[in-house]
Structure formats: C-alpha cells, structure tokens
Amino acid sequence: MASRAWPLGRRRIPPLGLALAGGGGLAVALVAGRWPLAPLWLAAGLLVLAGSAVAGRFPGQALAGLLALVLLQDPVVAAGLTPLQMADEAMVILAMAGLAWQALRCGRLVRTPLDLPSLGFLLAALLSAAVRQVPAWIAALGVLSLAKGLAVFHLAARLPDPRRAARRGLPWLLGLTAASAAVALVQRLGGAGVYRLMGRLDYHQQWQGTKAPSIFFNHNSLGHVMVLAGLPLLALALSPPALASLGRATRPVRMAALICLGGLVVSASREAWLAAMAGLLILAVLGRSRRHWVLALAVCLVLALGGLGVYAGSALLRAEIARRTAGVWEGWRLYQMGYSGWSYRGEYRVYNILKSWEIFLDQPLLGTGPGRFGGATAVRYPSPVYAAYDFLPLNGAYIPLDVFWSRLLTEFGLLGAAAYLSCLAAYGRLAWRLARAPDPLGRATGLAAAMALAAVLVLGVFSPALEDPLSSMPFWALGGLAWALGRASRTDISAIADAAGSEPNAVGGGPDEGPDLAFGTGP
C-alpha cells in the first residue's frame, strides 16, 4: 500500500546542474565586481550545496551526526570551539535542504501528521514578525530556535529505512548516554579530584559536589538527557521482541537504562526527577499490565529514595530548597503588592510567569514577535521589550526564561502558541496510537514517545526545554522515528496481506488500527 505523499512533479534535477547554476551565478557577481565579499559567498554557497547534497544522500547519517553534535556540544564549546554554538542550527538547515532536494528529485514527499501544524506555526510566527516589525535576521533566529526541533521530527519521519536507522543508532544511544551517566557517577563518588581533572572544580565548589553535571553545562542538562534517553531505553528493555527485530540483545539495554537511572539520581535535578515520574506514569497507564505498574512504581520509589538521600546528606541543598520554596509565596505576594521591577525579591520563576502574563495581556494575539522575548535570541541580541516593561534580570543578566510555556505564549501570541501546541497534540496522538500497534517495535517506540512527551511537558514548566537542543532535538527525533517505524510496519503488513490475497485487517487488526486512522499512511 502506497504512503500518502505531497505530489511535487516528476522532474529530476541533477545535483551537478544545481551546483553549476549556483556557482555560475555567484561567479558572475564576482566578475562584475559588484559584490566585494563574492569569494567568501561563493565558497559558502558551494559548501551549502555540497552539504545539502550529502545530507540528502545520507539522511540517516546526517540525523545521527546532528544528534551526536547536540550531545557533545557543551564539552566541545567549553574546550574553546565557540563557533560550534550555532552548528546544530546549520546542520538542521543543511539536512532540511537535503530533504527538499531529494523530494524534488523523486517528485514526492511523504506526508506526516505534523506537516500542517508545523506550517501553521511558521505562518503565525512570520505574521507576528511582520506586524511587530522585528528585523528579519532576529525574527529568523527566533523562529529557528523552535522550528529546528520540528525540522528534526520531519527528518526522522522521512528516513527511507527507519528500521536500519534504529538498528544502527541504538548502540550509539547506549554508548553516549551510558558514558555520560558513568561520568556523573564517577564525579559524585570521586569528589573534587575528578572535577579538577575535568576542569570543573568551580562547579564542585559551588554545589559542594552534590550536583553532578557530567560532560554537560550543568546538572539540569544531565538530568534532561538521562530522562529523554533513559525512558526510551526502558520502553525497549520491556519489549524483547522489539529488540530482537533490531538484532539487539536485551541485557545491554537494561544495563544502560539502569545506569541512566543512577545518573539521574546523582544529577540532583529536581525538574528531571519530576519529569521522569510523569513519563513513568504514562508507562503504567499505556502499558496496561501489572508488570508495567509495578516497574513504574519501583522506579519512582528509587528516585524518591535517591532524592531524599541526596538532600539528607547535604545541608547546602536543604537550605536551597527551603529558600526557594519560601520564595514562591513571597514572590507572589511582593508582585501583587506592586514590586514588579528591580525591587522584586522572591523566586525568579514566579516572577517570570507573572511578568510574562502582564506582557502577554498587552499583545495577546501575536505576541512580542519572534526573537523578542524569553529565548536565547532575545538575550544574544538585546530586546527592547525588556527595557519597555522594566523586566528584572537574574543576577544582573538576562537569561532564557526558565518557564518555556510562558515564553511561548508571550513571544508568539495565541496564534503561534496554538499552532505549536497543535504540533505537540499531533505528536501525542501518533504516540498513543503507536503504543497500541500490533508490531512490537512500533508499540515500544510509540510508548517511548508518549513517555518522552509527558516528560517534556513537565520540563517546560521548569526550563526552556523545547528551545534547548539538548532536550528538544532528541524528543522530536524520537517522535519522528516512531512514526516512520509505524509507517514501515503498516506497509509490511499490507504487503503481506496483498501477497496472501487477503485484506490488511486480517493480518493487522480491526478497522480502528488501519493505516489511514493510525498512521496516516493510506493511499
């Protein structure tokens, strides 16, 4: 049964022809002498064309390279390679250009459930930027901060052979996450000496060794990685048939999931603990078996006891949580009394929520415009919105808002926020349906995607989770891969049914699980 696709015509465009055309146009500008930087632009243009061709030819490798870069970006940048801070955005653009290139060559583009919601978000963001008169380059960076995650979904969803990608990618996932978790455990047990060897002695002194960051920027980053890697590993470990279909053994996956649990505990990331518990609740509900409930409760108990042990052993952490808890009520009370600027004293997240709501009410439909509030772009290129509303910086410096949902609503308005939330709703719908699929691998990845969605919804309350590539890109990639595996499974079932001269429902289940309803892959 053929997959749904957007028809793009049948004209084949040779890569060499595109490269010659682009290079020729730039060469004309160089000869004419009207573009002083023509040599640089010529080289950049040819590099982009070559990179797009490579990404289009090897989409699985391009996606794997992007995710590996995201996981290793913090230590690489800390080592002095600061230009790589924007490398993930560049790789996303190249990979999307490669996808477009292949679609034009083949004359078709497979449809996904996120196509229309993603387009709606882009249109809403562009309308907001135009009405608010945001400079084009700032608007582009602001939109890209969220759109790059959506782009990763589309790249993963359109992998030509998702099973092969999963089979080859699983060992890398096991290796990188288990290694980063092991580093965190060594940091926690080894103390100052390990931190000194890694050049992170200042972090040890700040938290007295109670919060392990591993190779990442801080302990919360480690916690996010452990949640978004550990939950999918747990879902796979519970399905030996799914692992068998990938040619992988169960024991290494279970060991990696256990190591991730240890890394999550020693990270001392409260938001990651809560996110993990939310994901485990989904495991219990969608798993629909006593074993899933018992396992979810057992892991939650381990997290709770581990968290109590971490805090019981540190007076510093107990004082911190007491101060921040008291600051929630105090911050709310002070804000209601009119202390909404530099005179505010209290929990900063409370201030973020209340001040963001005040700004949102002034421009509810379209927001402040992309790149103008709450994200890294508004920090990197100072936004006039902060000064206009006397927005209080944290310790004298503006940072990306710790509450992603308030940032989304305030920056993109009701239109943009509704479009982005519809993307998440489509993600949840496909994950829920996949979790009920007859194919073990599709069911396991659907369950993993549903658990990751619950975790990300919680992380968005405490961090810029869906802007931070360390959490947003693995999350969206998991959803895209799960959908692609479901589509491939349905295609196989339909082919078997056609070969047997029977209807697909005779092999794959009742009409509610058919291709059109479950995965949108009907004719």
Image (cartoon, grey):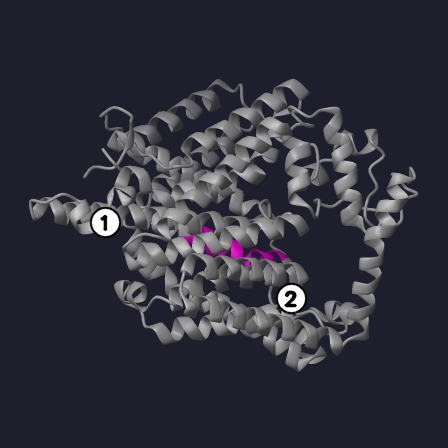
User: Residue 421 or 139: which is nearer the viewer?
Assistant: 421
User: Residue 67 or 122: which is nearer the viewer?
Assistant: 122
For the record, the magenta segment spans 64-77
User: Residue 355 or 168: which is nearer the viewer?
Assistant: 355
Amino acid, disc 1: Gly
Q: Is residue 342 left or right of residue 432?
A: right
Callout 2: helix, strand or loop? loop
Residue at 44% in and 75% down: 255
Residue 79 visible somewhere in the drawing: no
Amino acid, disc 2: Pro
Give x and y (percent) for residue 358.
78, 32
Residue at 23% in and 28% down: 12
Cα gap from disc 2 to disc 1, whole angstroms: 46 Å
Q: Which mark is residue 509?
A: 1
**The quarter of the displayed image where residue 171 is located:** bottom left
Residue at 14% in and 43% down: 503
Disc 2 target residue: 213
Q: How many marks?
A: 2
Residue 31 versus residue 487 in the image, above or below: above
Residue 60 versus residue 426 in the image, above or below: below
